Protein backbone atom coordinates (compact mmCIF):
# COMPACT_ATOMS: atom_id res chain seq x y z
CA UNK A 1 0.00 0.00 0.00
CA UNK A 2 1.37 3.43 -0.96
CA UNK A 3 2.22 5.98 1.72
CA UNK A 4 -0.50 8.32 0.42
CA UNK A 5 -3.10 5.58 0.62
CA UNK A 6 -1.99 4.71 4.14
CA UNK A 7 -2.27 8.38 5.10
CA UNK A 8 -5.80 8.54 3.68
CA UNK A 9 -6.71 5.36 5.54
CA UNK A 10 -5.54 6.88 8.82
CA UNK A 11 -7.48 10.08 8.11
CA UNK A 12 -10.71 8.16 7.57
CA UNK A 13 -10.16 6.23 10.79
CA UNK A 14 -9.60 9.49 12.68
CA UNK A 15 -12.88 10.91 11.38
CA UNK A 16 -14.64 7.72 12.43
CA UNK A 17 -13.10 7.97 15.90
CA UNK A 18 -14.23 11.58 16.34
CA UNK A 19 -17.82 10.79 15.32
CA UNK A 20 -17.89 7.67 17.50
CA UNK A 21 -16.76 9.74 20.50
CA UNK A 22 -19.76 12.04 20.15
CA UNK A 23 -22.24 9.19 19.89
CA UNK A 24 -20.64 7.27 22.73
CA UNK A 25 -20.91 10.17 25.17
CA UNK A 26 -24.43 11.11 24.08
CA UNK A 27 -25.72 7.55 24.15
CA UNK A 28 -24.28 6.72 27.56
CA UNK A 29 -25.51 9.94 29.18
CA UNK A 30 -29.02 9.78 27.72
CA UNK A 31 -29.30 6.02 28.23
CA UNK A 32 -28.31 6.17 31.90
CA UNK A 33 -30.46 9.21 32.67
CA UNK A 34 -33.51 7.68 31.00
CA UNK A 35 -32.89 4.15 32.20
CA UNK A 36 -33.13 2.84 28.65
CA UNK A 37 -31.34 -0.43 27.98
CA UNK A 38 -31.41 0.09 24.22
CA UNK A 39 -30.05 3.64 24.25
CA UNK A 40 -27.38 2.67 26.78
CA UNK A 41 -26.43 -0.25 24.53
CA UNK A 42 -26.17 2.15 21.61
CA UNK A 43 -23.84 4.32 23.67
CA UNK A 44 -21.74 1.38 24.82
CA UNK A 45 -21.53 0.11 21.25
CA UNK A 46 -20.36 3.54 20.09
CA UNK A 47 -17.77 3.62 22.88
CA UNK A 48 -16.48 0.20 21.92
CA UNK A 49 -16.51 1.28 18.27
CA UNK A 50 -14.32 4.20 19.28
CA UNK A 51 -11.85 1.97 21.11
CA UNK A 52 -11.77 -0.47 18.22
CA UNK A 53 -11.30 2.37 15.75
CA UNK A 54 -8.32 3.55 17.78
CA UNK A 55 -7.01 -0.01 17.61
CA UNK A 56 -7.38 0.06 13.82
CA UNK A 57 -5.68 3.45 13.74
CA UNK A 58 -2.77 2.11 15.78
CA UNK A 59 -2.47 -0.90 13.49
CA UNK A 60 -2.54 1.30 10.39
CA UNK A 61 0.14 3.52 11.93
CA UNK A 62 2.39 0.58 12.73
CA UNK A 63 2.00 -0.88 9.26
CA UNK A 64 3.43 2.33 7.83
CA UNK A 65 6.74 1.48 9.48
CA UNK A 66 8.60 -1.19 7.47
CA UNK A 67 10.70 -2.22 10.47
CA UNK A 68 7.88 -2.37 13.00
CA UNK A 69 6.85 -5.63 14.64
CA UNK A 70 3.42 -5.36 13.01
CA UNK A 71 4.94 -5.01 9.55
CA UNK A 72 7.01 -8.15 10.11
CA UNK A 73 3.85 -10.20 10.56
CA UNK A 74 2.40 -8.83 7.34
CA UNK A 75 -0.53 -6.54 6.64
CA UNK A 76 -3.05 -9.33 6.11
CA UNK A 77 -2.21 -10.94 9.44
CA UNK A 78 -2.34 -7.70 11.44
CA UNK A 79 -5.58 -6.57 9.82
CA UNK A 80 -7.17 -9.96 10.42
CA UNK A 81 -6.22 -9.89 14.09
CA UNK A 82 -7.70 -6.39 14.50
CA UNK A 83 -10.92 -7.36 12.73
CA UNK A 84 -11.17 -10.57 14.77
CA UNK A 85 -10.85 -8.56 17.99
CA UNK A 86 -13.54 -6.17 16.77
CA UNK A 87 -15.91 -9.00 15.94
CA UNK A 88 -15.30 -10.78 19.25
CA UNK A 89 -15.80 -7.66 21.39
CA UNK A 90 -18.99 -6.64 19.58
CA UNK A 91 -20.30 -10.20 19.84
CA UNK A 92 -19.75 -10.21 23.61
CA UNK A 93 -21.57 -6.86 23.97
CA UNK A 94 -24.54 -8.09 21.94
CA UNK A 95 -24.80 -11.29 23.99
CA UNK A 96 -24.53 -9.38 27.29
CA UNK A 97 -27.23 -6.94 26.18
CA UNK A 98 -29.45 -9.82 25.10
CA UNK A 99 -29.12 -11.36 28.55
CA UNK A 100 -29.99 -8.04 30.25
CA UNK A 101 -33.02 -7.57 28.03
CA UNK A 102 -34.36 -11.05 28.74
CA UNK A 103 -33.86 -10.46 32.46
CA UNK A 104 -35.82 -7.20 32.23
CA UNK A 105 -38.74 -9.01 30.64
CA UNK A 106 -39.14 -11.01 33.85
CA UNK A 107 -38.77 -8.03 36.18
CA UNK A 108 -41.55 -5.75 34.96
CA UNK A 109 -39.94 -4.12 31.94
CA UNK A 110 -38.38 -0.65 31.72
CA UNK A 111 -40.45 2.58 31.65
CA UNK A 112 -38.90 5.14 29.28
CA UNK A 113 -39.83 8.66 28.15
CA UNK A 114 -40.68 7.76 24.56
CA UNK A 115 -40.79 11.36 23.32
CA UNK A 116 -37.21 12.12 24.35
CA UNK A 117 -36.10 8.67 23.22
CA UNK A 118 -37.62 9.16 19.76
CA UNK A 119 -35.96 12.55 19.30
CA UNK A 120 -32.63 11.10 20.38
CA UNK A 121 -33.19 8.18 18.03
CA UNK A 122 -33.73 10.53 15.09
CA UNK A 123 -30.52 12.37 15.95
CA UNK A 124 -28.65 9.08 16.03
CA UNK A 125 -30.10 7.87 12.73
CA UNK A 126 -29.04 11.03 10.91
CA UNK A 127 -25.56 11.09 12.41
CA UNK A 128 -24.84 7.40 11.98
CA UNK A 129 -26.18 7.44 8.43
CA UNK A 130 -23.76 10.20 7.54
CA UNK A 131 -20.83 8.34 9.11
CA UNK A 132 -21.78 5.12 7.32
CA UNK A 133 -22.15 6.94 3.98
CA UNK A 134 -18.87 8.84 4.34
CA UNK A 135 -16.73 5.87 5.39
CA UNK A 136 -18.35 3.56 2.83
CA UNK A 137 -17.63 6.14 0.13
CA UNK A 138 -14.00 6.38 1.22
CA UNK A 139 -13.67 2.60 1.27
CA UNK A 140 -14.70 2.41 -2.39
CA UNK A 141 -11.61 4.46 -3.16
CA UNK A 142 -9.18 2.95 -0.65
CA UNK A 143 -10.39 -0.68 -0.70
CA UNK A 144 -8.78 -1.25 2.72
CA UNK A 145 -9.76 -4.07 5.06
CA UNK A 146 -9.66 -1.87 8.15
CA UNK A 147 -11.93 0.70 6.52
CA UNK A 148 -14.27 -2.04 5.36
CA UNK A 149 -14.55 -3.31 8.94
CA UNK A 150 -15.21 0.27 10.03
CA UNK A 151 -17.97 0.51 7.43
CA UNK A 152 -19.62 -2.61 8.86
CA UNK A 153 -19.47 -1.10 12.34
CA UNK A 154 -21.27 2.05 11.19
CA UNK A 155 -23.74 0.04 9.15
CA UNK A 156 -24.66 -1.88 12.28
CA UNK A 157 -24.87 1.32 14.33
CA UNK A 158 -27.08 3.02 11.73
CA UNK A 159 -29.51 0.12 11.49
CA UNK A 160 -29.49 -0.18 15.27
CA UNK A 161 -30.35 3.51 15.67
CA UNK A 162 -33.16 3.21 13.12
CA UNK A 163 -34.57 0.17 14.89
CA UNK A 164 -34.42 1.99 18.22
CA UNK A 165 -36.24 5.02 16.83
CA UNK A 166 -38.92 2.86 15.22
CA UNK A 167 -39.33 0.92 18.44
CA UNK A 168 -39.81 4.02 20.56
CA UNK A 169 -42.34 5.40 18.08
CA UNK A 170 -44.23 2.12 18.49
CA UNK A 171 -43.94 2.41 22.28
CA UNK A 172 -45.30 5.96 22.11
CA UNK A 173 -48.27 4.64 20.15
CA UNK A 174 -48.83 1.97 22.79
CA UNK A 175 -48.90 4.60 25.54
CA UNK A 176 -51.83 6.26 23.78
CA UNK A 177 -53.70 3.00 23.35
CA UNK A 178 -55.70 0.75 25.69
CA UNK A 179 -52.55 -1.40 25.96
CA UNK A 180 -50.46 1.35 27.56
CA UNK A 181 -49.37 -1.02 30.34
CA UNK A 182 -47.36 -2.96 27.76
CA UNK A 183 -45.21 0.04 26.81
CA UNK A 184 -42.73 -0.73 29.61
CA UNK A 185 -41.74 -3.86 27.72
CA UNK A 186 -40.88 -1.98 24.53
CA UNK A 187 -37.29 -1.28 25.60
CA UNK A 188 -36.28 -4.88 26.45
CA UNK A 189 -38.23 -6.32 23.51
CA UNK A 190 -36.37 -3.99 21.14
CA UNK A 191 -33.09 -5.05 22.68
CA UNK A 192 -33.93 -8.73 22.20
CA UNK A 193 -34.95 -8.24 18.57
CA UNK A 194 -31.92 -6.09 17.81
CA UNK A 195 -29.53 -8.55 19.45
CA UNK A 196 -31.05 -11.51 17.63
CA UNK A 197 -30.78 -9.77 14.28
CA UNK A 198 -27.40 -8.07 14.60
CA UNK A 199 -25.54 -10.94 16.19
CA UNK A 200 -24.67 -12.19 12.71
CA UNK A 201 -22.62 -9.06 11.90
CA UNK A 202 -19.85 -9.52 14.51
CA UNK A 203 -20.04 -13.29 14.07
CA UNK A 204 -19.40 -12.86 10.35
CA UNK A 205 -16.52 -10.47 11.02
CA UNK A 206 -14.94 -12.95 13.41
CA UNK A 207 -15.33 -15.94 11.08
CA UNK A 208 -13.97 -14.07 8.05
CA UNK A 209 -11.01 -12.75 10.03
CA UNK A 210 -10.15 -16.24 11.28
CA UNK A 211 -10.28 -17.56 7.73
CA UNK A 212 -8.01 -14.75 6.58
CA UNK A 213 -5.60 -15.48 9.43
CA UNK A 214 -5.49 -19.12 8.42
CA UNK A 215 -4.71 -18.17 4.83
CA UNK A 216 -1.99 -15.78 5.96
CA UNK A 217 -0.40 -18.49 8.09
CA UNK A 218 -0.42 -20.86 5.12
CA UNK A 219 1.30 -18.25 2.97
CA UNK A 220 3.92 -17.53 5.63
CA UNK A 221 4.53 -21.24 6.11
CA UNK A 222 4.98 -21.74 2.38
CA UNK A 223 7.47 -18.86 2.23
CA UNK A 224 9.52 -20.21 5.10
CA UNK A 225 9.54 -23.78 3.80
Image (spheres, helix red, strand yellow):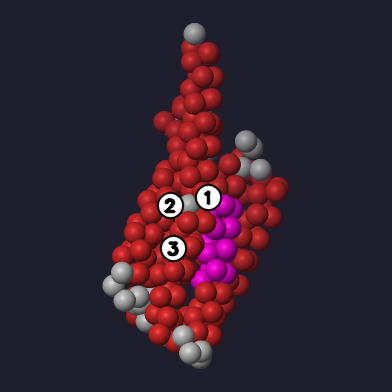
Q: Is residue 7 visible?
A: no
- Residue nearest the observer in this picture, 140 or 90: 90
From what the image shows, is residue 6 above or below residue 35?
above
Residue 165: quadrant of the picture: bottom right
Disc number for residue 192: 3
Query: Residue extending furthest front?
Result: 178
> Which residues fall within the magenta stretch?
150-164
The earlier-in-sequence mark between 3 and 2 is 2
From what the image shows, is residue 86 above or below residue 183?
above
Rendering coords of residue 44 (x, y %)? 39, 63
Looking at the rendered image, the disc whose residue lies closer to the viewer, 1 or 3, is 3
State the residue position of label 2: 90
The earlier-in-sequence mark between 1 and 3 is 3
Look at the image and say whether residue 20 sits in the magenta stretch: no
State the residue position of label 1: 201
Residue at 49% across / 62% down in the picture?
A: 194
Query: Which element carries disc 3, helix, strand or loop?
Result: helix
From what the image shows, is residue 128 above or below residue 114?
above
Mark 3 crowdedness (10 Å alpha carbons): few <14, some 14-19, many ≥20: many
Circles 2 and 1: CB atoms closer than 8 Å: yes
Query: Residue extending furthest left?
Result: 107
User: The N terminus lies in which quarter of the figure?
Assistant: top right
In three-dimensional space, the C-alpha distance between marks 2 and 1, rounded to whole angstroms, equals 9 Å
Q: Is residue 132 visible?
A: yes
Look at the image and say whether residue 157 sits in the magenta stretch: yes
Amino acid sequence: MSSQKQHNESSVLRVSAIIATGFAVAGLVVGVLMGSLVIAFDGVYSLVSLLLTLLSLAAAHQLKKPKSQAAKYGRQTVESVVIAIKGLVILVIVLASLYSAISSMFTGGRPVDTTVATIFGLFNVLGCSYAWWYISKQNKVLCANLIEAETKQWQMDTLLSFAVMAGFITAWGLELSPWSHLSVYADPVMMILISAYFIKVPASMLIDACKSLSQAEDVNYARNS
